[in-house]
Amino acid sequence: MSEHREEQKDGQTRTFDPASIHLGWWEPPIVRTPEGLGQRSSASDRFSCRNKANGDRGRWKHAGSRTFYAARVELRVRPRVGRDALDTATAMLRQFRLVHSTAGMWEAADLHWWWRRPRRSDTMDQLFWAGANGRDIAATLLTDWGEHWGLDPIVVPGAEEALAQIWPAALALLPDLPGAPDVHMYIVDDDEELIGLATAAGFTPHSDRGASCWMPVDRRPGNDRLPSGYRLCDRVTDSARPHPMITRNGAQVAERLAATGLYRPELDLCVRDERGAVAAYGLFWFDPVTAVGHVEPMRTEDAHQGRGLARCVLAEGLDRLAALGAHRLKVNHELGNPAAAQLYRSAGFERVSTHTGFVRHARPD
């Protein structure tokens, strides 16, 4: 149980409840500097505050004009499965994005894209942790990618101290994953805490690196004309045909995408040639909560490359995101793909962060 404490400031009384503060932004009603709640350092303007409810030390953090308290918290695990897990993780990633405009690697739309095919992870318990008020504040998502599994921790703003607490529970699940596979993680390069935890647990970096790129919607490029012999389609006008991504993503891709909350068929674009064959495609995601438009995936088939098809698909998709109300646009791409990097850079995207893949190899019995 958390401890409530009343303090006097300028003749007024306020209540300090550590258990409520760590769950989100806390804006002191009297002054932004919470005197008496922590020790101020004149050199760094940072604060240290002990959560008397559990005896662990938290800290005051600052982001722009906001101040919040990150405390070590008492967590309760709440396993979730399938769509319930997807929807809960969606809400957490949205909460993160509403606070941090470009930080982190994943959008809620990424998780909805991952849902495009059946996976063994669909039916397994995904671990979520709730704080004192019952809200989910942390999770460790495990995703079956076939030849390996992925591990992705999520922590909502204000609960950053929970990462070190949930990490051992995530590691305990890895030896029991079907097939005893390698486990992969992607970590933003400035996330020193997660890199440290992963390295200590036996994860090592590999050559798979990428970048997250952003731009405001009003900087998007103009729409180019498709070359002769090609036409643009979406899943509203082209729904009678097999889905253009069926070859790489399985027979259920259309059904699985349609089952997610963020998929919109008018944002599922493809280019077909004169014979009706798929030449290029791009899937665009609009999140009405965060007003972020996301691009994932984009592809031009080998026989049709070098004709500007990807740029046409990208420009059309970004225009449709803008029409739906997107304020900011995002794409992730591999650093080892210079053609993709050039495409997005020429469209106006700017690199904001980079990330590195880490792997923990399966250990022999």
Image: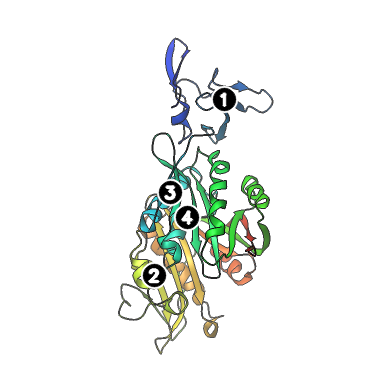
User: How far apart, in angstroms, are the residues tagged by discs 2 and 4?
Assistant: 18 Å
For the N terminus, which image quadrant?
top left
Sequence-first disc among 4 and 1: 1
Q: Residue at x 65, y 52 (%)?
A: 201
SS for callout 3:
helix
- Which quadrant: the C terminus? bottom right
Q: Kindly identify which numbered label has been placed on residue 147.
A: none
Q: The residue under label 2 is which amino acid type?
A: Asp
Mark 2 is surrounded, within 10 Å at the Cα level, by few (under 14), some (14 to 19) or many (20 or more) other residues, namely many
Q: Nearer the viewer, residue 264 or 170?
A: 170
Q: CA distance from mark 3 to mark 2?
A: 22 Å
Q: Are marks 2 and 4 in contact (CB under 8 Å)?
A: no
Q: Residues within 10 Å of mark 3 (few under 14, many from 20)?
A: many
- Going from N to C along the chain, the mark reached first, 1 or 2, is 1
Identify residue for label 1. 50
Separation of marks 1 and 3 at Cα, in angstroms: 29 Å
Q: Secondary structure at mark 4?
A: loop
Q: Amino acid at mark 4?
A: Glu
Q: Is residue 180 left or right of residue 26?
A: right
**Pointer 3 or 2: first along the chain:** 3
At a point 57% along the width and 47% down the height, the residue shown is 168
Indicate the position of residue 231 as horizontal and vertical percent values.
Answer: 40, 80
| Label annotation for residue 94 | 3
Residue that numbered label 4 is attached to: 107
Amino acid type indicated by mark 3: Arg
Q: Is residue 155 above or below residue 242?
A: above
For residue 268, the mark is: 2
- Secondary element under disc 2, as helix, strand or loop, is strand
Q: CA distance from mark 3 to mark 4?
A: 7 Å
